[in-house]
Amino acid sequence: MSRKMKNKVIPNLRIERIAAEGKCVAHHEGKVVFVQNTAPGDLVDVRINRGKSSFMEGEAIRFHEYSKDRIEPFCSHFGTCGGCKWQHINYDLQKNYKRQQVVDQFERIAKVEIPEVLPILGSAKTQYYRNKLDFTFSNNRWLTREEINSGAQFERNSLGFHIPKMFDKIIDIDHCYLQGNISNEVRIAVRDFALEQSLSFYDIRNQVGLLRNLIIRTTSTGESMVIVQFGEDDTVSVNKVMEFLHQKFPQITSLLYIINLKKNETFNDLDVVTSSGKDYIEEEMEGLKFRIGPKSFYQTNSEQAYELYKVAREFADLQGDEVVFDLYTGTGTIANFVAKNAKQVIGIEYVEAAIEDAKLNAKVNGIENTQFYAGDLKDILTEDFVRNHPKPDIVITDPPRAGMHEDVVKMLLKLEAPKIVYVSCNPATQARDVAWLSEKYSVDKIQPVDMFPQTYHVENVVRLTLKP
């Protein structure tokens, strides 16, 4: 972008629609202009901060007219915190845009014939729907422009979320509308206790400090897990924090901590210490119990996960005598959920700890017709594996955002299972994979599911049927 364009202000730009990743779109002199934190129908002045030959990106610096579809954001952190970027758009419109996102991705990327995309399944809860949140301690709290200009001194220790695109700046959260139960109370209490006790908050840039990370997990059954990550192996201070939490919140059913002296917050390779209670919590779905450990993956909207899995089961249309391959099975939630309707379910997942959870969940529920294998899917789902296992009648696949590895898609084309049910958290990579699979499969059902209200993210379920 030329220097004369950067910081240029384009006046009276009418916002037209919402595009990928939640950005809004306008046009100026033949170029697309992407603008954050606006709504279709807004009339704004936009300051350009980035661009190329075919597009520009900018921020709205003045609103002349507000969209009729705007609503008042409910969170005081809206616009700074990057968690709920669509609070200013009414929920019905959010759902419409998410469904349209699926349509656009399939038309633009998959380029295959598709049926009409079904109306999106909305979430019953649009606030307090998450069962897991990660908060970061920092000694470098984000200051607003007003705070900086005031010249006053402010407490710089904070506990909250990363400012978008700034790894070392944390916004101190007063109240978060994403997670209910005891989440807000625990976060505020541990932050205030640490300040009173003069415990050090983590210096993200220099990687020193005691308090590093706080993870809170809850279930619909009322259980809760709290995990504190410490950046120093200081037994006295660690015990002080954990004893405070135990005394203040006796209802916490799983209170854990981790000593993490690494340069990142991942802890799959670290020991998790049980301070009090159990080392897991339990979620329930249709009478099935699912144990969730500190390293377990579980869909972060429990109630809507149930709706999602029901769609997958309905699309599979199991009659009781089928062999099902469940790829990217995670902790075996879908595999165990559909097992009662199938002859056998074989789950594959690259995270070994997740497979151990899957096996445990099958045992806890008395499910005896599941088998689970750990390893990279492209290395496990080979011709040797297929020769030594029953041929699948149905494949259910729920890959990460990057979609399926091309070698996995090639093996699916060789397997020629009559049906594939593809669950995805990223319709773009899903559409790419569907394009690859279209060599032998046609799409006959598409069902978007909203797992994350107030955000642009959308889950999508597609059923593919083997061509004659």
Image (tube, rainbow, N blue to C red):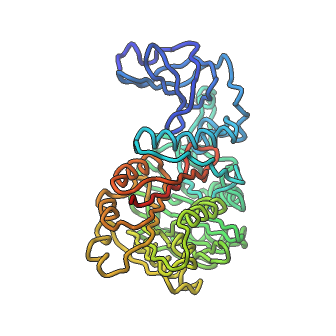
Q: Position of residue 438 (x, y in %)?
A: 37, 52
Q: Is residue 341 above or below residue 307?
A: below
Residue depicted at 57% across the width and 79% down the height = 340
Q: Identify the residue at the far left of this view.
A: 384
The picture quadrant where one finds residue 361 is bottom right
Residue depicted at 52% across the width and 78% down the height = 342
The picture quadrant where one finds residue 98 is top right
Q: Position of residue 215 (x, y in %)?
A: 57, 61
Q: Position of residue 87 (x, y in %)?
A: 66, 39
Locate residue 123 relative to residue 214 in the image: left or right: right
Answer yes or no: is residue 137 visible. Answer: no
Q: Quadrant of the N terminus?
A: top left
Residue depicted at 61% across the width and 79% down the height = 278
Q: Is residue 32 above or below residue 401?
A: above
Answer yes or no: is residue 449 visible. Answer: yes
Q: Nearer the viewer, residue 250 or 411?
A: 411
Residue depicted at 46% across the width and 79% down the height = 356
Q: Is residue 282 above or below residue 81?
A: below
Q: Quadrant of the C terminus?
A: bottom left
Q: Nearer the viewer, residue 211 or 433?
A: 433
The picture quadrant where one finds residue 306 is bottom right
Count the marks.
Answer: 0
Q: Nearer the viewer, residue 63 or 118?
A: 118
